[in-house]
Structures are given as C-alpha cells and as structure tokens.
Amino acid sequence: MFLGNDERAAPSMGRRGFLGFAAAAVSAAVPVATGMVTGVATVAPVLLGSGTAEAAPLTGGVRRLALHNINTNERFDGVYWADGHYRPEVLRKLDVLLRDHRAKQVCRYDPRLFDLLARVHQAVGSDQPFEVICGYRSRRTNALARRRSRGVAKESYHTRGMAIDIRLPDAHLRGISEIAKGMQSGGVGYYPRSDFVHLDVGPVRSW
C-alpha cells in the first residue's frame, strides 16, 4: 500500500489526493463473476451529468475492455456495450473487479469511465490490458487514507465509482496522460513516481 497525491478537484476546490493500493499479485488469475464475493456491500455512484457516454466516439459496433486488477489478480476481457446498450450483467462484473477489496464493498460504477478507458486504449493502440492500481474506495478506506496523508480528498471520485488509477505495460505513462487530457472527458493525473495515471469522469482538469 502506498500513499500519494493523485486527484485534483475542480479548480475552485484546489489539489486533492488519493490512496493507491499496490499489493503484490497472487500467482493465478481468477475469473471475475458477479457472485464471487460473499458478504460484500454494494453502493451506487454519485453521477455528474447524464450518466451516459453516447457522445464518446468508439469505432465498431461493440465496446470492450481488458482489465487486470493487480491487487486481487482478477481479470476481465470482454464486451460491455453492444447493440446500442450497456450490458448490465457485464457492468456488474466490472463493478466487482473494481471493488474495495479491503472493505469488501462493491460500488456501481459510472459507465462513462469504461467508455473513457476504451477510448484511451483504442487511441494508445495497446495490446495489453489496463493494470488497475486502484478502483473504488469506500468511505472508510478513504478516511484511513486521509489520516495518513493531507492530500487525500474527502470527496474523492474514487468513493463515487467515477475514478480509476491505471497503467499499460506496453505504453508510456506520459503518452496515456496526454491522450486522456486531449479527450476532455474528466480529470487526468500523471504520477510517474508511483507509475500510474489517474482518470475520472468528474470536471475536466489535469495535473
């Protein structure tokens, strides 16, 4: 586990921070399934705007993602949008993969973030899945982070199911960051020392 500033709120709110988790991955990949976690609480995100991403251009008739959660070693590689609609059962699998594994809580993610990830992956031209450093953070986990670091935002977009910290094994962080910033779809934070890029679908800003 490491602490670092990786989130900035809208300009009027100043610099924000973040708790990232960098636990060592276990040896075997575990398929994601909606019912794989027992005793897990589920919360809904706080959405900004319409909550849709139809304005986000993606080539082809389907939208797909490939993710690898380095904290749990769980993976997802599949289509989450097809025939003009998001696939609810697939979105639930993504929610589970991005859960707060420490607090055992699952958040219903804003699907606009998945569209942003798909667009970035497409633009970068990567052949590898995104490595997920941090997805959802429960209020309790976020509060713990705030006690350890002054830079952690009380209302982090990680706690709303609207943010993710990622990297790609075959792409430079700076390139990912610049491509995401050009899309003007939310917040983009560049963290070369911690080896990740923060993406969210909150207000457009970068740091």
Image (cartoon, grey):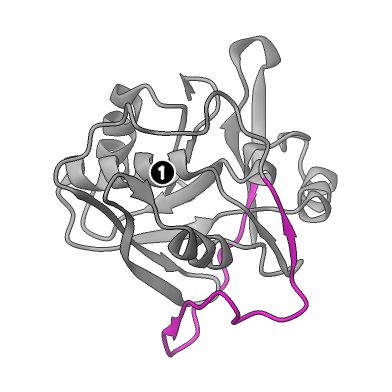
Specify whether 49 is left or right of 178. right
User: Exactly how many numbered labels are in the figure?
Assistant: 1
Task: State whether residue 154 appears in this view.
Answer: yes
Instruction: Name the residue nearer the viewer: 68 or 194.
Output: 68
Residue at 75% across, 54% down = 138
Instruction: Name the residue nearer the viewer: 96 or 11.
Output: 96
- Give the quarter of the image for residue 110: top right
| The N terminus: image quadrant | bottom right
**Residue 105 drawn at (x, y percent):** 72, 64
Above or below, 26 against 124 in this view is below
Range of the magenta residues? Answer: 19-44
**Residue 185 drawn at (x, y percent):** 40, 26
Query: Under tag 1, what secondary structure?
Result: loop
Residue at 55% across, 28% down = 202
Above or below, 90 against 207 in this view is below
Magenta highlight on residue 25: yes
Specify whether 44 is left or right of 177. right
Specify whether 172 is left or right of 194. left
Specify whether 43 is left or right of 74. right
Circle 1: is it few (<14), some (14-19), or many (20+) Cα within 10 Å? few
Farthest front residue? 83
Q: What amino acid type is highlighted by mark number 1? A: Pro
Residue at 51% across, 78% down = 33
Magenta highlight on residue 52: no
Instruction: Name the residue nearer the viewer: 132 or 15.
Output: 132
**Residue 166 drawn at (x, y percent):** 42, 52
**Residue 51 drawn at (x, y percent):** 52, 33
Q: Which residue is mark 1?
A: 192
